[in-house]
């Protein structure tokens, strides 16, 4: 392990990016109704807030995840997540 980065705090912007990346991924999955997700009700806004919080925690965890790092390298995206952590960030981990 020779990664020198990984201790920077997750900014609001990054968290937003995580969620956006998640939406991008989900959009590609069959059966996912992206429009329903985008039409925000207060409940969904609250959910978003929770996801934001989760995303932050998941992002911290993903710093130690080999799969996440691999995806990041592949996409050249510092905030990319592997399937498992992406699902967790979106609140789909049960
Ligand atoms: Zn991961």
Image (cartoon, helix red, strand yellow):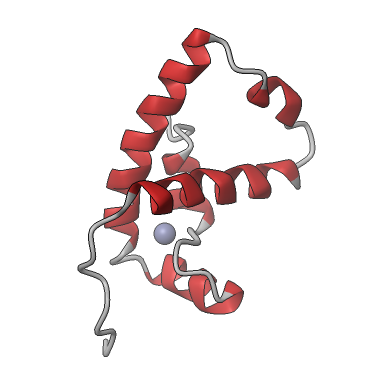
The x and y percentages for residue 33 are: 74, 27
Q: Is residue 2 above or below residue 38?
A: below
**Near-viewer residue (44 or 13):** 13
Query: Is residue 70 found left or right of 34 in the rendered image?
Result: left
Q: Is residue 88 left or right of residue 83?
A: left
Which quadrant is the N terminus positioned in?
Answer: bottom left
Q: Is residue 33 visible?
A: no
Is 84 placed above or below 76 here?
Answer: above
Horizontal side of 47 relative to 7 (left or right) equals right
Residue 28 in the image: state x and y as whole percent.
76, 47
Q: Residue at x 79, y 39 (%)?
A: 30
Q: Position of residue 68 (x, y in %)?
A: 44, 65
- Farthest-out residue, bottom: 2
Query: Residue 26: x and y, percent?
Result: 66, 42
Q: Is residue 32 visible?
A: yes
| Residue at the spot 34% in from the left edge and 53% down from the top edge | 59
Farthest left residue? 7
Q: Is residue 55 positioned above or below 9 on the image?
A: above
- The image quadrant that residue 74 belongs to is bottom right
Instruction: Ligand 1: give its quadrant.
Output: bottom left
């Amino acid at each position: 392990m020779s990664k020198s980065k990984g201790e920077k705090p997750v900014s609001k912007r990054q968290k937003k990016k995580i969620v956006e990346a998640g939406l991008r991924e989900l959009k590609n999955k069959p059966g996912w109704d992206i429009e329903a997700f985008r039409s925000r009700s207060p409940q969904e806004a609250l959910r978003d807030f929770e996801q934001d919080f989760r995303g932050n925690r998941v992002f911290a965890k993903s710093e130690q995840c080999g799969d996440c790092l691999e995806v990041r390298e592949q996409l050249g995206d510092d905030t990319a997540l592997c399937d498992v952590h992406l699902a967790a960030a979106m609140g789909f981990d049960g």
